[in-house]
C-alpha cells in the first residue's frame, strides 16, 4: 500500500469509527486520561511508603499512604470496568454499521458483479475482516493519544529523578522501536496474503456446504477434498510462517525488555551502594520506567494492529466502493396501482462478454391480460431477456419500454417491486411453509391463502405433516421434493400484487398432471397481469397467447401454438421431438 493511499485509507477508516460516536469517544477519552493520571500517582505513593513511612518509621504516614494507594487502585479498577463496557458498546455499533452497509450495498450491485462474485471471499469480509475492525476499536487510537501524554509526563519525571539511568533505558527502547517498525511492515503484507487465501478457502467451503447432497450423489467429494487440502496446506504454511515471525519478534522484545530491568537494578543498585540513590527512589524509578515503556510498547504494538486493521478495512471498502452500475432513480417514474404493463423490446442487443452476443436485435412485446412464452434451446437468450426486464443489466443497444417509457427512467426499487420471478431453483428459507409463502406479508387474507394452497395441491402434502403449515422445511427447503418447492414458490408469486409475473422453468419439477393443475391455477390468478413463461417443455406453453422462438439471441419465429405448428419450422420440430420422447 503506497503512503498516500494508506493515509487516505486510514483517514476514511477513522471517520467510520468516529461517525455517530463523538460523545461516547469524548467520555472514553476523559476516563482514559483519568486512569493515566492515577497511574502516574502510584510510584510517588510507593516512594513515600518506602522512604518516608517505612524508612522514618512513621506509622501514621504509612497507614495514610496505604489507604491512598488502595483508593487509587479501586478507582482505577472501577473506571476500567466502565471503560470496557463503553468500548464494547462502540465496537458493536461499528461492526453492525459496517456489516449492514456492506450487505445493503451488495443488494444494489448489478448482475455483472453477481456473476463474477466469489461467495467465500464476501463471507470472509463480512465475518473475519469486520471482526478485525470490531476487535480493533477506536479506543486503540485514543489509547495512543493517552500513551503519548503519559510517556511525555513520565519522561519529564524521570529526567528529574535519574537522567543518567534514563539514558541507558532510552537507548535500549529505541532499539525495540526499530525492531517493531521493521516487523510491522512485514506483518501487514503477510496478513493481507492470509486474508486473501482465507477468502478462497471460505469460497470452497461455501460451495461444498451449499451443494453437499449433489456432491455426494455425483461422487465428487474427492475432487473437493483434493482442492481443499491443497489450499488449506498453503494457508497453514503461511499462518505457521507468520506465527514464527511473531514469536521471534516477541522473543526479541522480551530480551530487550529484560535488559532494561537488568540495567535499572544493576546500575541503580550501584548508586544505592554509593549512597547516590535511595531504595524508594529506585523502586519508583522502576515503576515510572514501566509507565514509560508500557505506553511506548503499546504505541508500537498499536501500529501492528493498525496495519492489520487497515488490511481488513481495505477489503471492506473495496466491497463498499464497488460501483453501482444500475443506478436508482429516486425521482423516476413509478408503476402505479392501477397501471397495466406493456413491455416492449425494440432492436435490443446485449452481451455478457465481448466475445459473444447473447441478444441480437430483439423485437418482442409482452402485453397485459396475455401470457407470452419464450422457448428455445439453452443459451438462446431467454433468461437474458428476463435479466434485462428486471434491470440486473442494461441493454448495449436498443431500448426496452414499459408503457412507452424507457425502462431506465423508472424508479428502480418500484420497478423491481412490481416484478415477480419464479425460477426452477426455488429460493426457500429455513422457516415454516407458511412463512416461506407469505414472506411476512401481513395484508394477505387467510381465505385467499388457503384457497390458493388448495388449488395448487399444496395442502395434499401439508396435511400429512405433523405441524402442517408451521412445519420447518430446512435450509433451502431440503425436507421437500423439487415439485413441492416449486409449488410454494408459485404460491408466493400468485399471492403478491406484482404487475409482471415471470415463470422461468417454474414447473420443471412437476409431472404432467400436476403441471396442468398448476398452469390452470396460474391462469386463474393472473388474468389482469403481464405473464411471461420461459420453457423447454412445449406442453407448458401450448395455451400461451403469444410464443417467441429464440435461437442464438434472435427471434426466429412468433405466433400462437397452432400458428407455429402450421409453420412447420423449428417450433414444430421441437414439439414433435418432445412428443416422441413422451
Image (cartoon, grey):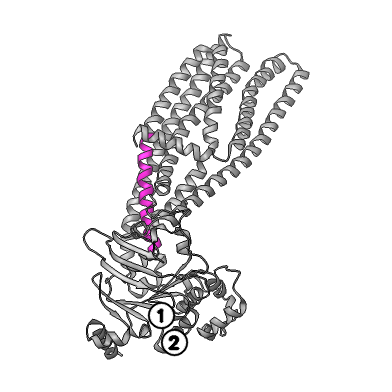
Q: Nearer the viewer, residue 448 or 526?
A: 526
Res 468 seen here: no
**Most common secondary structure along the magenta stretch:** helix
- Quarter assignment of residue 313: top left
Residue shown at the point (61%, 33%) measured from the top left: 26
Q: Secondary structure at mark 1?
A: loop
Please provide percent x and percent y for residue 524.
Answer: 49, 83
Residue 212 position (above or below residue 261): below
Residue 212 position (above or below residue 520): above
Q: Label 2: which residue?
A: 514
Please provide percent x and percent y for residue 191.
Answer: 38, 43
Magenta stretch?
184-207
Q: Are marks 1 and 2 in contact (CB under 8 Å)?
A: yes
Q: Is residue 52 magenta?
A: no
Residue 65 position (above or below residue 209): above
Residue shown at the point (45%, 50%) measured from the top left: 128
Q: Residues within 10 Å of mark 2 (few under 14, many from 20)?
A: some
Q: Label 1: which residue?
A: 507
Q: Residue 522 bears which disc, if any? A: none
Whole-number angstrom distance, CA of label 1 to CA of label 2: 9 Å
Amino acid at each position: 500500500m503506497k503512503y498516500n493511499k494508506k493515509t487516505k485509507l486510514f483517514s476514511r477508516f477513522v471517520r467510520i469509527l468516529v461517525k455517530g460516536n463523538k460523545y461516547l469517544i469524548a467520555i472514553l477519552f476523559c476516563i482514559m486520561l483519568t486512569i493515566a493520571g492515577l497511574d502516574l500517582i502510584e510510584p510517588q505513593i510507593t516512594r513515600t511508603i518506602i522512604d518516608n513511612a517505612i524508612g522514618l518509621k512513621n506509622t501514621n504516614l504509612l497507614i495514610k499512604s496505604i489507604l491512598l494507594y488502595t483508593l487509587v487502585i479501586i478507582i482505577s479498577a472501577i473506571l476500567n470496568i466502565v471503560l470496557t463496557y463503553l468500548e464494547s458498546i462502540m465496537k458493536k455499533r461499528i461492526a453492525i454499521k459496517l456489516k449492514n452497509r456492506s450487505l445493503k450495498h451488495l443488494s444494489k450491485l448489478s448482475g455483472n458483479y453477481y456473476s463474477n462474485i466469489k461467495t467465500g471471499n464476501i463471507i470472509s469480509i463480512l465475518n473475519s475482516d469486520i471482526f478485525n475492525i470490531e476487535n480493533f476499536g477506536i479506543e486503540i487510537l485514543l489509547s495512543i493519544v493517552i500513551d503519548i501524554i503519559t510517556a511525555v509526563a513520565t519522561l519529564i519525571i524521570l529526567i528529574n529523578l535519574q537522567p543518567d539511568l534514563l539514558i541507558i533505558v532510552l537507548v535500549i527502547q529505541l532499539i525495540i522501536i526499530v525492531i517493531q517498525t521493521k516487523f510491522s511492515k512485514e506483518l501487514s503484507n503477510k496478513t493481507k496474503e492470509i486474508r486473501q487465501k482465507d477468502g478462497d478457502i471460505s469460497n470452497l467451503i461455501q460451495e461444498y456446504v451449499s451443494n453437499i447432497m449433489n456432491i455426494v450423489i455425483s461422487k465428487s467429494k474427492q475432487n473437493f477434498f483434493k482442492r481443499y487440502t491443497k489450499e488449506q496446506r498453503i494457508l497453514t504454511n503461511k499462518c505457521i510462517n507468520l506465527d514464527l515471525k511473531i514469536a521471534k519478534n516477541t522473543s526479541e522484545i522480551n530480551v530487550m525488555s529484560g535488559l532494561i530491568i537488568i540495567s535499572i537494578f544493576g546500575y541503580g543498585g550501584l548508586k544505592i551502594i554509593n549512597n547516590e540513590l535511595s531504595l524508594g527512589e529506585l523502586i519508583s524509578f522502576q515503576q515510572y520506567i514501566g509507565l514509560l515503556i508500557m505506553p511506548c510498547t503499546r504505541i508500537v504494538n498499536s501500529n501492528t494492529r493498525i496495519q492489520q486493521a487497515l488490511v481488513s478495512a481495505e477489503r471492506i471498502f473495496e466491497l463498499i466502493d464497488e460501483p453501482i452500475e444500475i443506478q436508482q432513480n429516486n425521482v423516476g417514474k413509478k408503476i402505479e396501482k392501477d397501471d397495466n404493463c406493456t413491455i416492449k423490446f425494440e432492436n435490443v442487443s446485449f452481451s455478457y462478454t465481448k466475445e459473444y452476443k447473447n441478444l441480437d436485435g430483439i423485437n418482442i412485446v409482452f402485453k397485459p391480460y396475455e401470457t407470452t412464452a419464450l422457448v428455445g434451446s439453452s443459451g438462446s437468450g431467454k433468461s437474458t431477456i428476463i435479466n434485462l426486464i428486471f434491470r440486473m443489466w442494461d441493454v448495449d443497444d436498443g431500448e426496452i419500454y414499459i408503457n412507452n417509457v424507457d425502462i431506465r427512467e423508472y424508479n428502480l426499487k418500484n420497478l423491481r417491486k412490481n416484478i415477480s420471478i419464479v425460477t426452477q431453483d426455488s429460493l426457500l428459507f429455513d422457516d415454516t411453509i407458511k412463512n416461506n409463502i407469505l414472506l411476512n406479508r401481513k395484508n394477505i387474507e387467510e381465505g385467499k391463502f388457503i384457497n390458493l394452497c388448495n388449488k395448487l395441491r399444496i395442502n395434499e402434502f401439508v396435511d400429512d405433516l405433523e405441524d402442517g403449515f408451521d412445519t420447518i422445511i430446512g435450509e433451502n427447503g431440503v425436507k421437500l421434493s423439487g415439485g413441492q418447492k416449486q409449488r410454494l414458490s408459485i404460491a408466493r408469486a400468485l399471492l403478491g400484487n406484482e404487475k409482471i409475473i415471470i415463470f422461468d422453468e417454474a414447473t420443471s419439477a412437476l409431472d404432467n398432471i400436476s403441471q396442468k393443475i398448476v398452469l390452470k391455477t396460474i391462469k386463474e390468478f393472473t388474468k389482469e397481469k403481464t405473464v411471461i413463461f420461459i420453457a423447454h417443455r412445449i406442453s407448458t406453453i401450448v395455451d400461451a397467447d403469444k410464443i417467441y422462438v429464440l435461437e442464438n439471441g434472435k427471434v426466429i419465429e412468433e405466433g400462437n401454438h397452432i400458428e407455429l405448428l402450421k409453420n412447420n419450422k423449428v417450433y414444430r420440430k421441437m414439439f414433435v421431438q418432445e412428443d416422441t420422447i413422451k
